[in-house]
Image: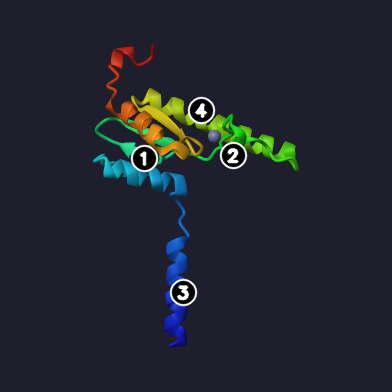
């Protein structure tokens, strides 16, 4: 019985520890699914393995935490202690994000970044995401 309980506890812990899918990302996925959108998650074969991928529309969404990706908002501010360490780390993340976006766009993908703070107003975030998804960008105007 003890063994059974610990297995059950372990199962619950394993289920709660996710390697991918943060809270904000799961919320957005749920809402998009409800709106009828179908998508793939974390396509490892694409640069930066985007969080939400709409293959036939050739569109990719990143859901970024404001702190880790250095958003210019109140949640993106550097902590007071170990400032140099964090500044360097987050600058590195930002540089990687920009590279990833460029690689995706060069491959013909449209990219949208949704910030964690954006989804505090889920309705307007969804509006923005929907218009991004419905927008058809002609290849010849893509780089304008
Ligand atoms: Zn933010």
How far is mark 2 from mark 1, CA to CA? 20 Å
Disc 3: residue Cβ within 8 A of ligand 1's nearest atom: no
Residue 52, labelled with which disc? Answer: 1
**Ligand 1's quadrant:** top right
Identify the mark nearer the N-term, 4 or 2.
Answer: 2
How far is mark 4 from mark 1, CA to CA? 17 Å
Q: Farthest residue in the bottom direction? A: 1
Residues at circles 1 and 3 in contact by the CB criterion of under 8 Å: no
Tell me which residue sits at (41%, 38%) in the image. Answer: 122
Instruction: Locate residue 89, reporting x and y percent.
Output: 64, 38
Identify the mark nearer the N-term, 1 or 3.
Answer: 3
How far is mark 2 from mark 3, CA to CA? 32 Å
Q: Given this view, does label 4 or label 2 mark the residue nearer the observer?
A: 2
- The residue pinned by badge 2 equals 67
Instruction: Locate residue 100, reporting x and y percent.
Output: 47, 31
Identify the mark nearer the N-term, 2 or 3.
Answer: 3
Disc 1: residue Cβ within 8 A of ligand 1's nearest atom: no
Disc 2: residue Cβ within 8 A of ligand 1's nearest atom: no
């Amino acid at each position: 019985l003890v063994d059974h309980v610990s297995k059950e506890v372990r199962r619950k812990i394993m289920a709660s520890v996710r390697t991918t899918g943060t809270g904000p990302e799961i919320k957005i996925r749920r809402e998009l699914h409800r709106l009828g959108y179908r998508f793939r998650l974390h396509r490892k074969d694409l640069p930066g393995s985007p969080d939400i991928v709409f293959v036939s529309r050739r569109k990719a969404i990143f859901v970024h935490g404001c702190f880790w990706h250095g958003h210019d908002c109140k949640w993106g501010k550097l902590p007071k202690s170990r400032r140099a360490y964090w500044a360097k780390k987050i600058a590195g993340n930002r540089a990687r994000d920009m590279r990833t976006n460029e690689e995706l766009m060069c491959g013909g993908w449209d990219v949208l970044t949704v910030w964690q703070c954006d989804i505090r107003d889920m309705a307007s975030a969804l509006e923005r995401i929907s218009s991004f998804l419905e927008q058809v960008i002609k290849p010849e105007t893509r780089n304008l």
